[in-house]
Amino acid sequence: MAESQEHIRLVNLVYKKVCKLVPESKTCLVEKDSPENRKVGYNVQGFIPDVYYWQNDLFIIGEAKTLKDFSSRHSKLQLRAYIDECQKFIGTAYIIIAVPWPLKNTALNYFRKIRNNEDVNNSKFIVVDELGSEFEV
């Protein structure tokens, strides 16, 4: 299935954020799932992240979610798999999610609930809205 233009824009926002977190000499190792690139080579419990980076003690999974798919069963299972994968990592792990502005608070609340109810000290959650504003949970 072809990705929507909205989804592609959100993936690009995630990619930009990931590249800011990664050492400049390693940005070429950031994998991005997009129509012009090959698929990301990493699979998490059957799910393929939109953006992926892993080197030494830094692990990052990035995902773009639109208004249509954020609340879907597939997205919930996908985010759960990514959270579980980050918790296994020894080092610093990030989940970065880009969403349209109207979903910003929903996404923040989703990660706040996880932060408050689970032992996820190893993971950092960042929500990026379509305007480029970033919010860490």
Image (spheres, grey):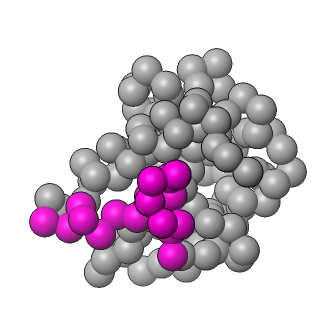
Residue 40's place in the image compared with 7, above or below, is below
Q: Picture coordinates of residue 22 (x, y %)?
A: 25, 59
Image check: 4 left or right of 21? right
Image check: 23 left or right of 35? left
| 125 or 10: nearer the viewer | 10
Residue 57 lies in what quarter of the image? bottom left
Q: Residue furthest left?
A: 25
Image check: 73 left or right of 115? right
| 11 or 39: nearer the viewer | 39
Q: Picture coordinates of residue 103 (x, y %)?
A: 65, 26
Q: Residue at x 62, y 66 (%)?
A: 48
The answer to whether any part of residue 71 appears in the image is yes
Image check: 73 left or right of 14? right
Q: Residue at x 61, y 75 (%)?
A: 43
> Residue 117 in magenta?
no
Q: Residue at x 68, y 56 (%)?
A: 79
| Boundaries of the magenta span | 25-41
The answer to whether any part of residue 99 appears in the image is no
Residue 49 lies in what quarter of the image? bottom right
> Residue 26 in magenta?
yes
Q: How many marks?
A: 0
Q: Picture coordinates of residue 52 (x, y %)?
A: 45, 64
Residue 109's place in the image compared with 57, above or below, is above
| 19 or 7: nearer the viewer | 7
Q: Residue furthest right?
A: 73
Q: Picture coordinates of residue 61 (x, y %)?
A: 49, 61
Q: Residue at x 64, y 18 (%)?
A: 102
Residue 58 lies in what quarter of the image? bottom left
